[in-house]
Structure formats: C-alpha cells, structure tokens
C-alpha cells in the first residue's frame, strides 16, 4: 500500500505561518503529502585521495596538543600515564577518553589569552591554527548557490549529475575529519550520531509537498515546518511511519515555503529563500540558512530522500561542535580550533561590511523522511474526544483516503 | 458445612496438577460433562488480575507488586475453567511468599499503618492482642472472603504476637501474620463450601459466603465487598429478594466493567499476547506500545458496545466505532494527533471509520489480525482457526506432525504471490484440505490486513482477493465477514456458553444443559444484551447448585 498517508483535503497554507512572498500555494494544490524528517546528516562524498591526511587517534591528538604547549616527551609520557614526579601513580592518567585528570584540563585550557590558559572552545582564535586538512577532491553534493556555475571559485562537481559549480564549502572544511567521511550509502558518522541522539527529544521537522497531482510533472510547493510532537521510535530504532504530527502554531520561525517543480518523482525548489527552524541545542539551536534549495525524491516505498542546501552562518556550525567541549573533541576526534579556523577560512558568503570576513558558509545536508500525517492547529481543535467524554454520537473523524 | 481442601493439599505438597483438556480432533468443543445433576465444587486459583484487584480493593491501589505469577491453563476455552485444575508449584509458592511479605510490609509501614490499621497498639514495641485481633479479623474477612473462624483468628493473632515479641515490634509481628494469610490457600484459591439446600431435600448448594464469592468473581472479577459479605452473613443471599438486590447492585456498579473486561480477556485468549512478537524488519511499527494498545482498543470497543451503549453483543463484529491512540493510528494509517505533551501517554479517543471501510468490527483490529499471524507474515489459517475457536466455540484439530509447510511459508515464491495462492496450493494435499476448508475461507477475507495489523491491497505486486465464506455464507471482504459472524447463530451461543462456564468455573454438566439452552433463548429475547444475560445467570439457581460432597 502506497498512500494511506496521502490526504486530499484542501490545504490551508495561507491560514497559518508565514507564506513565502509571491506564492499562492492553495491555488494549484489539490494533493498533499507529508514526511517527518527521520535523518539529517551532512551530505558528503568522500573518495580516495581527496584528503592529504585524515584524523589522528585520541592519544596522538592529546600528545600533539601537549607537545604544542612546549612539554618534553618524558613529561608527556608521565602525564599520559598518570605518573607523579616521585614515580608514584596518581591514577589520573589520560585514558583516551573522558576523565578528570590533569591532561584533560591541559587540553581544555590550551588556548592562551594574555599569556594565561583559557578555555580553547570559548577562545578558539587564541591558539594557532592547527591546520586541519581540508578536502582537495572535486566532487561534492549540494547546489549552485551563487549562480556562477563552473566559474564559482572552489566549487565542486555533483558526483551523480556532474553539474558543476556546486557550492559546499562546509564539506571542504570538515570532510577530512575521519568521522565526517562517508557517502550517500554510508552516512557520515558525526551527523548521524547527533541527529539520532536528538530526534526523539526535539520537535519533529515536517516536509510537505503540495501539487495538483503529485504523481505528475508540474508545479509544486515545498514546505518545511516544525511540529509540536517528537518523532516516535519504531521497532528498529528507526522513525515510526504514519504518525500524526501537530504543526507548531508559533509563526516566528517554523514555516518555510518554496515554489518547486516535480519531474520524474523528484521535487526541486525553483526559487531559493530563507530557512529558519528551531532544532535541538545539541545540533544547532536556531537553524538559519539563506539561498535555501531542496531537491527531494519521493520514493516508491513512500519515503523521502534528498538534499537541503544553502548558506549558513559558520559560527553557528562551529558552536554546534564546540559546545560539546573536551568530551566532544575527544569522542569525535575533532580538533575544535581546527574546525573554527577551517570554517572561517572557507566561509564563502555574506561578508561583514567592516572586516570583509564572510559570515556564511555553503552547506548541503542529506535529508530523509518517513510518511506522516499533519494536523494544523485549526484542525486540531475539532475531532476526537477522550474516551471519558466519548458520546454515542457518530463519526468524530473519518479515515484518510486509501489507494 | 463441607469443606473441600483439595487445593490446600496441593499447595502443601507443592505439586502442580494440570488435568487433561477435552478431546482433541472434534469439530466442536465438548464442554458438557456427563454428570446428570449439578457439578462439583471447584477450587479456583486466583488469576493474577484477581490477586492484584483484591489487594487493591482491600489495601488500596497504591500497593505495589513484585514477583511473577504462575502461568494459567486454558481448558474448555477459558482460563477461568483451567484455574480450577491447577495448584501451585514450589517455585510458585516462593513467588507468592515474596509477594505476600512485600505487600504486608507496605501495609504495616510507617507510611500506611495510620490509614490501613484500624487501631494503635498500647506499646508499639511489644505485642498487642486487642489491636492485632481487630486488624487481622477485619483484613482476614476480606481476604478469605468470609469471617475467620475463632480458631483461625486465634492462630493468626498468635503468629502476630510471637513475631512481635521476638522482633520487639508490634507492626513487624502484624506484618508476619498478614503475610501468612496472604500465602494461605483460603486466600489464593476461591475455596467453595457447600451446604444442604433446605428447599430441595437431598440437594446441595453453595453456602452464603461461597455464593457471594461466586457472584463477585463473576461480575467484578474480585472478591466480595463488605456489603456483599454482610448480605451473606445476614442470610439475604438465600432469598430471591436479597439476591436480586445484590445482583442489581453489582450490575450497576462501575466495577462491572472490570468483570466484563476480565471475561473478554479470557474468552478472546489475550493471555497469548505475552508471546506475541513481530519481525521488526517487516513490521517496524509494531512495537511494545502497539501490543499493549491493540488489546485495549478491542476491549474498549467491546465495552462501548455492550455496556456503555447496552447494545447487541453481535455488533462488536460489525461496529466501525472504536477507540485509538496515536500509536495505533500509525498502524492503521489513521490521522490522529496527540493531545498530550511528548513522552506522556495519550488518552484514548473515540474514532469511527467511514462507511464501507474495511476496518469493521473487532476481527479487523490488530488484536485479532496481528495476534493470529506469524511473526513475519499474515495467516488466513491462524485467523480462521482463531475465529472458530475463540468466537464460535468450535474446535479445529491441530495439524498432523508431518505436514510440509514449504509452499505456505515461502512468501517470495513468484508462482504464489498472495496468501490465497499459497494456501490454495497447500490445499492440494488431501490430508490438509479438510481442516483448511474450515479455516482459510474466513481468514482469507482478512488478507487486507498484514501480519502487523496494517492495511494493504497488494501483496508481492498482486491484488489481494478478499472474498470468503463462513458456514455457507459468502462475502467479498472483511466487512462481509463481520456481518456473517454477526448473523451466525454460533457467535451468540458461544458467548452464552462461555459466560455460563466462566461463571461456574467449570464445564456445564449434562444436567445443566437445559439451563444453558434457556440462557440462549433469553439472550436472543433480550436483544443479545450482555448485562441482561449476566443478570439472568447471576440470578440462576444453577450458578449456586452443587453436587453432593
């Protein structure tokens, strides 16, 4: 069965939220289909030879930082092993993971401000650029955001469509970290972990496609909005399908509507616009993008798979990593100042008028969704009752249409 | 007074006794014993739900439970009958012991003693005969479902006093004595006693307290309350007027819902839900909350039809009105928004499917189509068998041991894309065809529902044919099946048979067959309304007549 989740009631897009300027989505829309975002990961295309070097292990990372602080090899060995000057062991050696030993504090406070140790995650520019390697390959997923096509500096080529001029400097900046490597088949570890950790604890993101006939080529609109409800876990630790989500009535950030076209089951936005969503603080508290593009495949099994791209404030991305502190740095093998410097160096849009430093960086995320029902606030008032209030009266709700 | 101590003896021996079930291989269940007169006294072990309910009734719903109950045994189609054929194993006794100590500890705890113990000892560091006697006498009456004899009460008080003296704590002593009562066969079993029937020379009947228990467990699935015990004590249950007053009181109590719920849990075999598992790769939406909610959906639907609307029992097979949660909505493809905050369970909500929707009646609920399927595929055969067994009270023989299920099990065979094609191929084996004809034609009409309860129209790319037949009546889909069951005389007669044997706690005797036959007629006369049937049963002399000891 393909479409218990297809609803053909008329849409009320203009009734709630902020419609995209110039759109009149209800005029042509007769069919609507919604998906709950089940996975959001960085869209990466790692290939052989696209990086000068890849990440180092945690012990080596710690030793490298201690060496950079001017410590001798013997001193580093003693610190790492938890050996005191008199030869006794204090049990606070570096365990390769989280801990409270001296080494951990030396790593956290490895930045220097006015000659004094300060927290490196708060003051990443107070330590020398560790020169974390960046992607030198030519392929990446994403969109031609600046409209320059192949002439766009530092741009990539889409590995599937071979479109040139793909702007995705976030991939260039981070793609050589070991846990940021992957493909469309093997998801990048960091984002996969992060999204998996937060999706049950944050309001669901809902994508809705509207068109006169979703099975045919033609005009459409894509809406991304936030629900009040979290996604539910299924028996495979995946995202439950066909769950019903109430759309958050808060109009400030939660509705993003884009005109689009459907071709061969792929819906792609045709006019880029701003994107604002609240996410979980563990990911990015306030997700903002400019020049937002979406390319989404409505798959035969009912799921959704595609790419979300645009320009994003790079400091927001840095903070998403840095707020996890030493724990995140060690667990994920991420050199935080390296992230800071790489994102800053590769930011490619929205220059600060005073300094000329770009404030946004081009990004691309793979977005996957499972079929969902959507209830807008006005609709939510009607219908079902608690059993204690249930009267013999008939038909509080009717079933969705079936194929 | 004649006491039957068989169960007590079984407990003492720590032995498990499971008597054999009825004859296998018959096309209909043989539920009538050969006895011409009334049946014997039965000593039934409390079901887990009854145990919990009694403790909740006597001490409060805040009492928590630990431990595990021994599995029940189904006989004559009901666990209620099997409960009269089981004892307690040594391991089971250990569990009861642990539960008893735990419960007693909570009752005498500093937190609860002020509420649950009706007196205060003169000195909490030593025994207090008067206070112990008062508490144990009151609690014992409710737990044993009759007043304790003087000897029993003296023994219980002695235990309390001895333990208090040893522990130098009155409440510790009281807890020990209470735990002893909670482990006693008089509590763990419905201990029936009989007395000569003064109105029929040579005949016997349940004594007043056993009568009260028979009534209470039948209608409330719990022990008699104080008012019912008092009525028994005063002899009111021996008069038609007194009995009628109590029956009507029990039937109009909100607690009737618990009794009716317990009956259908038993009749529909929901004890098997504990073994239900689904292949997560095939049915990822079928999670533990779905298993829990699926049972409740059907029970709420039944209670709505038979109690809230006082409707025709047979309508449970056709009603499009049901109750859902958002999690069930995801199984059924129904838009049903949450109303509670995240991580908070949603209240049940009434929902009605549109006219003509395949989800019509309880046979289309996940509690039926998923429960009676395999972990990774649907099963027209299991569904048809369950319909015969649980709804129509007909027994289908088990398959022989040498059956080749290869064709049935291979859902990827391109030559047999649908379940209908697979069972049709399977039925070419003559040895299989006979029994499958009893089950598959009904089960195939439910093939729109996959093994996880979801809806489908296509299987392996082929359209699903949901035509079927039940006892000569043909239909095209699940809606037609529901109507066929509704109109099938066996559905109503099965309900009456189950209600009567559930109430008795045993199969009916040949001598009681006329009573059951009369109940069948009454049930039809009252429009198949279950409360009226329950009243008729509860006021029947047959419910309280027993054979000579």
Image (cartoon, coloured by chain):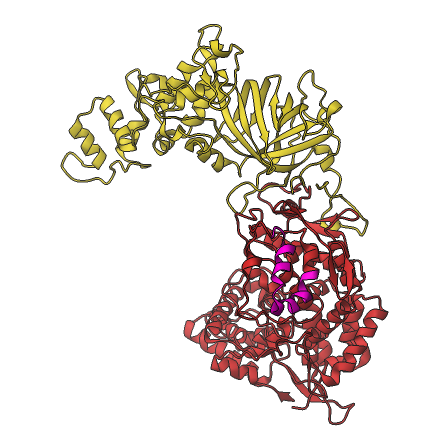
Chain colours: A yellow, B red
Q: A87 above or below A254? A: below
Can you say which quadrant of the picture contains the N terminus of chain A? top right
* Left or right position of A129 against A384: left
Residue lying furthest right: B525
Residue B31: in sight, yes or no?
A: yes
- Residue drawn at x 61%, y 87% is B3
Residue A237 location in percent, x, y?
Answer: 50, 44
The magenta-colored residue range is B416-441
Please check the rendered image and state whether residue B431 is part of the magenta-colored stretch, yes or no.
yes
How far across and how far down the image is residue A178, in percent? 36, 29
| Residue under the image location 83 percent in, 73 percent down | B522
Q: Nearer the viewer, residue A346 or B186?
A: A346
Where does the image place residue B527, in percent across and percent down from the top left? 84, 66
In screen coordinates, is A4 left or right of B408? right
Above or below: residue B237 compared with residue A252? below
> Horizontally, is A342 left or right of A206 in the view?
left
The answer to whether residue A338 is above or below residue B88 is above
Residue B248 within the segment the image draws in magenta: no
- Please indicate, yes or no, whether residue B456 appears anywhere in the rendered image: no
């Amino acid at each position: 069965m393909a479409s218990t989740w297809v609803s053909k009631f008329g849409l009320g897009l203009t009734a709630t939220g902020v419609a995209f300027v110039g759109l009149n989505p209800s005029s042509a829309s007769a069919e609507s289909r919604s998906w709950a975002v089940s996975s959001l990961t960085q869209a990466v295309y790692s290939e052989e030879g696209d990086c000068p070097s890849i990440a180092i292990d945690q012990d080596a990372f710690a030793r490298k930082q201690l060496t950079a602080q001017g410590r001798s090899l013997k001193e580093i060995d003693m610190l790492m092993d938890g050996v005191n000057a008199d030869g006794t062991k204090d049990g606070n050696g570096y365990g390769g993971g989280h801990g409270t030993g001296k080494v951990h504090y030396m790593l956290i406070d490895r930045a220097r401000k006015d000659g004094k140790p300060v927290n490196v995650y708060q003051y990443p520019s107070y330590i020398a650029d560790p020169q974390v390697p960046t992607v030198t390959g030519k392929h990446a997923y994403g969109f031609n955001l600046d409209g320059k096509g192949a002439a766009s500096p530092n741009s990539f080529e889409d590995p599937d469509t071979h479109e040139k001029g793909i702007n995705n400097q976030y991939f260039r900046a981070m793609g050589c970290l070991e846990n940021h490597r992957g493909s469309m088949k093997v998801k990048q570890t960091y984002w996969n972990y992060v999204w998996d950790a937060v999706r049950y604890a944050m309001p669901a993101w809902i994508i809705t496609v509207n068109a006169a006939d979703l099975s045919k080529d033609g005009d459409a609109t894509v809406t991304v909005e936030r629900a009040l409800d979290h996604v539910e876990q299924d028996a495979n630790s995946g995202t439950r399908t066909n769950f019903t989500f109430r759309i958050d009535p808060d109009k400030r950030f939660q509705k993003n509507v884009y005109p689009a076209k459907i071709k061969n089951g792929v819906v792609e936005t045709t006019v880029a616009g701003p994107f604002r969503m609240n996410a979980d603080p563990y990911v990015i508290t306030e997700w903002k993008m400019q020049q937002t593009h979406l390319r989404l495949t409505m798959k035969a099994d009912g799921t959704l798979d595609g790419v979300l791209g645009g320009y994003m404030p790079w400091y927001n991305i840095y903070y998403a990593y840095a707020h996890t502190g030493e724990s995140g740095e060690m667990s994920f093998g991420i050199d935080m100042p390296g992230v800071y410097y790489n994102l800053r160096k590769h930011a490619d849009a929205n220059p600060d008028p005073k300094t000329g430093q770009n404030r946004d960086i081009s990004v691309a995320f793979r977005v996957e969704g499972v079929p969902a029902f959507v209830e807008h606030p006005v609709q939510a008032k009607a219908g079902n009752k608690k059993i204690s209030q249930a009267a013999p009266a008939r038909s509080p709700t009717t079933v969705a249409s079936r194929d | 007074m004649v006491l039957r101590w068989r169960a007590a003896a079984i407990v003492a021996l720590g032995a498990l006794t499971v008597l054999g079930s009825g004859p296998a291989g018959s096309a209909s269940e043989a539920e009538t014993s050969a006895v011409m007169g009334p049946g014997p006294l039965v000593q039934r072990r409390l079901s887990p739900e009854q145990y919990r309910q009694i403790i909740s009734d006597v001490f409060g719903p805040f009492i928590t439970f630990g431990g595990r109950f021994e599995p029940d045994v189904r006989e004559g189609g009901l666990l209620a009958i099997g409960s009269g054929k089981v004892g307690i194993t040594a391991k089971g006794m250990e569990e009861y012991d642990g539960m008893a100590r735990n419960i007693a500890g909570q009752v005498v705890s500093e937190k609860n003693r002020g509420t649950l113990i009706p007196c205060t000892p003169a000195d909490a560091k030593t025994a207090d005969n008067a206070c112990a006697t008062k508490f144990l006498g009151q609690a014992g009456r409710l737990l044993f479902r009759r007043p304790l004899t003087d000897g029993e009460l003296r023994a219980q008080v002695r235990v309390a006093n001895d333990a208090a003296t040893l522990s130098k704590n009155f409440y510790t002593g009281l807890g020990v004595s209470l735990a002893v009562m909670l482990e006693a066969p008089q509590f763990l079993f419905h201990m029936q006693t009989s007395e000569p029937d003064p109105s029929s020379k040579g005949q016997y009947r349940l004594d007043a307290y056993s009568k009260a228990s028979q009534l209470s467990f039948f209608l409330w699935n719990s022990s008699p309350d104080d008012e019912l015990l008092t009525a028994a004590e005063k002899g009111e249950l021996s008069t038609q007027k007194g009995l009628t007053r109590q029956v009507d009181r029990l039937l109009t109590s909100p607690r009737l819902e618990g009794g009716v719920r317990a009956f259908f849990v038993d009749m529909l075999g929901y004890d098997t839900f504990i073994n239900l598992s689904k292949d997560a790769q095939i049915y990822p939406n079928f999670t533990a909350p779905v298993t829990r909610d699926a049972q409740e959906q059907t029970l709420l639907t039944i209670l709505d039809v038979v109690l809230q609307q006082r409707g025709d029992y047979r309508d449970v097979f056709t009603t499009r009105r049901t109750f859902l949660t958002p999690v069930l909505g995801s199984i059924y493809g129904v838009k049903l928004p949450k109303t509670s905050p995240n991580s908070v369970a949603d209240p049940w909500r009434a929902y009605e499917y549109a006219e003509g929707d395949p989800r019509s009646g309880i046979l289309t609920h996940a509690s039926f189509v998923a429960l009676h399927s395999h972990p990774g595929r649907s099963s027209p055969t299991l569904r048809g068998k369950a319909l015969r067994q649980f709804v129509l009270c007909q027994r289908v023989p088990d398959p022989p041991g040498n059956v080749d299920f290869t064709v049935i099990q291979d859902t990827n065979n391109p030559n047999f894309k649908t379940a209908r094609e697979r069972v049709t191929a399977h039925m070419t084996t003559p040895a299989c065809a006979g029994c499958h004809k009893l089950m598959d034609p009904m089960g195939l009409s439910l093939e729109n529902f996959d093994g996880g309860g979801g809806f489908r129209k296509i299987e392996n790319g082929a359209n699903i044919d949901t035509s079927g037949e039940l006892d000569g009546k043909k239909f095209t889909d699940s809606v037609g099946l529901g109507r066929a069951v509704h109109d099938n005389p066996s559905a109503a007669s099965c309900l009456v048979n189950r209600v009567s044997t559930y109430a008795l706690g045993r199969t009916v005797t040949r001598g009681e067959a006329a009573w059951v036959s009369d109940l069948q007629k009454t049930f039809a006369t009252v429009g198949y309304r279950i409360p009226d049937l329950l009243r008729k049963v509860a006021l029947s002399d047959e419910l309280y007549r027993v054979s000579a000891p």
